[in-house]
Image (spheres, helix red, strand yellow):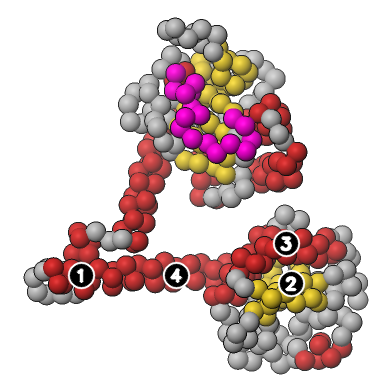
Amino acid sequence: MEFEERVAALAAKVRNQRDAIQTEEAAKTAFVMPFISLILGYDVFNPLEVVPEFTADFGTKKGEKIDYAIMREGEVQILVECKQPRDLLKVEHASQLYRYFSVTNARIAILTNGQVYHFYSDLDAPNKMDAKPFFVLDLEDIDDVLLPELRKLTKDEFDLDSIIYAAEELKQLGQIKRTMAAQFKEPEDDWVRFFAARIHDGTFTQRVREHFRPLVAKAAAQFIRDQVNDRLKSALNASVPQQATSEQPETLNSETAAVSDVDRDTEVETTLEELTGYQIVKAIACSEVKPNRIAGRDAKSYFAILLDDNNRKPIARLHFNGKARKYLGTFDVNKVETRHLLDSLDDIYLHADAIRGAVKNYVGDDDTKP
């Protein structure tokens, strides 16, 4: 498998088995050891590569162990500490990693609960582990942007200088993003002045500052919303080659419904809410099939979500064109649609089982069936 596929496979394993994992030891066996072997590429059964229960005495601390030490050429390169599977990872959990950092050659430390992985280095002071991770990998919410950085930690591509450089960059990027987020939410005077100076020719007085402060915050919010809208539309266009044609998803036990779908390709306008709903349904359905098999088609009266872009395999319908109410349509094994009233888009998650069930009904179907 490709690297990205291995990460996705482990993520699926975590998603499917996490409820059965109750102890730290179970998390190590089920998730952490596969992460070290499947993702990082080290042989967990070779003590020259991975040492479990690694011990390095120092000071008054004797016999204290860390869960795994990953070795390269006889030297410790990566330290791994595992916590309870449902623990929220905090800096307090990393006390052993802090101590071991100062007495080994390790420059990378990983704190994990099996699902979330915090990666640390010593960017702030030599041989002293930083208080904050330089990046976080959550197998429940994988950021594809971080996968190239994760790949640098693998056995085949391990280059410490490259890793440390990337860690420094990731840390600085994170700080800049947090600063930007704070400014977007509550812009400081310097931030307001920066934009006001490009619009207002006069002196930057208290009155001018108070006038522009809410405008800067409002413009920032609209900018983010526009960016999200553009990305959702791009994602939709990548998976949907065209808008609805006269051949629409049909409820197979209703000829009237099928006939009413004709000519829906005119005056079709895809809204941000439909795109967001489509992405939510797609995220739910991706637990059963690959994302590229989930397609969407917009129509005049509803937005259809299909398996394999096949109108005979409807997964869900978004009835969002009503003035007051919005509905999610789900399909049973006979392709009969049931509409569910939505108070918000988050309510789509309440019907995840029905969405996944519709996908399961089609998996393995012969696409040539009438």
| Residue 100 relative to residue 351: left or right | left
Q: Callout 2, which amino acid?
A: Ala
Residue labelled with disc 4: 225
Which-is-in-front pick, marks 2 and 1?
Answer: 1
The residues bearing labels 1 and 4 have C-alpha atoms spaced at a distance of 24 Å
Label whose residue precedes the other's in the sequence (2 or 1): 1
Q: Residue at x 71, y 34 (%)?
A: 22
Q: Residue at x 79, y 76 (%)?
A: 338
Cα distance, mark 2 to mark 4?
Answer: 25 Å
Disc 3 + disc 2, Cβ < 8 Å = no
Labels 2 and 1 touching (C-beta < 8 A): no
Report x, y in % for residue 299. 67, 84
- Image quarter hosting the C terminus: bottom right
Circle 4: residue type: Arg
Q: Does the magenta stretch include residue 162?
A: no
- Which residue in the structure is indicated by mark 2? 316
Where is residue 253? Give x, y as percent: 89, 82
Residue at the image point whose x is 32% and y is 26% from the top: 125
Relative to 350, is 243 above or below?
below
The residues colored magenta run 83-99
Mark identifier at residue 352: 3
Q: Which of marks 2 and 4 is nearer the N terminus?
A: 4
